[in-house]
Amino acid sequence: MKKYNLIFVANELANNNLNGPNVVFFNFIKTIYLNKIDYDKFNFYFLVPSNFKLYDLDINFIDLTKKLKENKDLNFIKLKKNNKLEIFLNLLRLSKFVRDYIIFYPRLTFLPFLNNQISFLYDLPLEKSYIMSENQLKDFIDKQFLFKKFIINNLKFIFTISNSVREDIIKFLGIDKLDYVYLGVDHEVFKPLKINEVKKNLEKYNLRFKNYFFYPAGKLWFRKNIINLLLAFHKLINNSSYKGIELVITTNNYNDLRDKYVYQVREVVKKYNLGEKVKFLFVDPKDLISLYNGAIAVVFSSYYEGFGLPILESLACKIPILFSDIPVFNEIFPENPFKFKPNSIENIYFTFTNFLDLYLKKEEERINRIIELGYKKILSFTWDNTIKNLLSKVKQNIFKE
């Protein structure tokens, strides 16, 4: 059987940086390595930084300065420097050894003299739709993608991560050479934990078990809708029935005082005296699962997203989630009754209270039914299925099989 060569450019995974899109390519590598997916149809090549590690697994690097004697199922190539020239030279060398290759970038990228280049386009800046008219938004996106359209036009194909975003890209950019694959969650990592284990990990961050709502924001910026969430939460804790509850937001940039949005967030915290009730934390990734497990519920208040990994992660841990009533979240879990209009402080507040009225009245059966419904819904969202779907669509759209 003919085998194709799929080259993943994972240059951003230095020190296993799993922020943003990097988590996608890391899970691609891990899943292909551990589960040996489609080894009979593809040879896989991963361009990774010199300090990349895949847990404690042995990684064999190939040397492109020497002639490859044979194609192996799985091959790692060490990037000595993280720059376009280093990537280009390694790809050029590799293209001399292998035929029928596809080069896959984690972000919009195009390099000359190479064939079959494809990329992810995760989303568009449509959070601006809450502060712009449609014509203003279209003009804004046209300017944002002025150079990116050159890249897109030179790429063989584009993948995105939800049908909602696919439709947005078609609408605003007029691109039709694209398809989507859903992302996944590792059910071996994100799962219900023993209470004692969770409590022990929460002690590191001075958190009490089942005493907080949790927003795994990752980064404070306008899209994440932090300010409306804070104002709704302020109203919540001013209600005597809910005053003991806290809000925990994980982020990597709360101390970046040069960032205008971070400054605005800090001003809201100061103005409404939220410092004792709202905690902005930068946590060890290993403790993230405990923060999910220890929460009353997860909150996901974004104006716009390309997908919604926190929805999968919270439901995999069997924790309820309150989220924005936006297309992509409804694409993942349309049956969720705990959703709100992200631009309405009142609506966010009422969603908090509607959930807490059930939670505090010990309506566990009703809440558990919703959790189980969501849990069954996300069982098919695995990285294994993501990879299989991606490889199938690569063959279908690139090699026309």
Image (cartoon, rainbow, N blue to C red):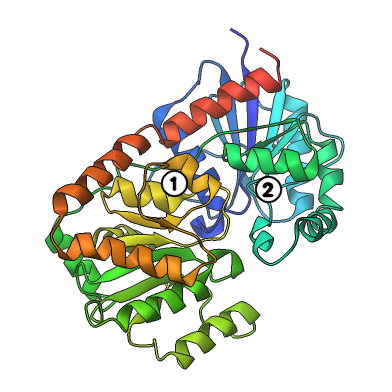
Examine the rendering and report whether any part of residue 360 can be seen. Answer: yes
326 or 198: which is nearer to us? 326
- Taking the image as shown, residue 325 lies to the left or right of residue 257, namely left
Q: Residue at x 19, y 69 (%)?
A: 209
Q: Residues within 10 Å of mark 2 (few under 14, many from 20)?
A: some
Residue linked to disc 2 = 107
The vertical placement of 89 against 38, above or below, is below
- Taking the image as shown, residue 115 lies to the left or right of residue 164, namely right
Q: Quadrant of residue 57?
A: top left
Q: Earlier in the sequence, mark 2 or mark 1?
A: 1
Callout 1: helix, strand or loop? loop
As drawn, the label of residue 54 is: 1
Give coordinates of residue 257: x percent, y percent: 59, 85
- Taking the image as shown, residue 394 lies to the left or right of residue 333, namely right
Q: Quadrant of residue 6?
A: top right
The vertical placement of 26 against 385, above or below, is below
Say which amino acid is labelled 1: Leu
User: Disc 2, disc 1: CB below 8 Å?
Assistant: no
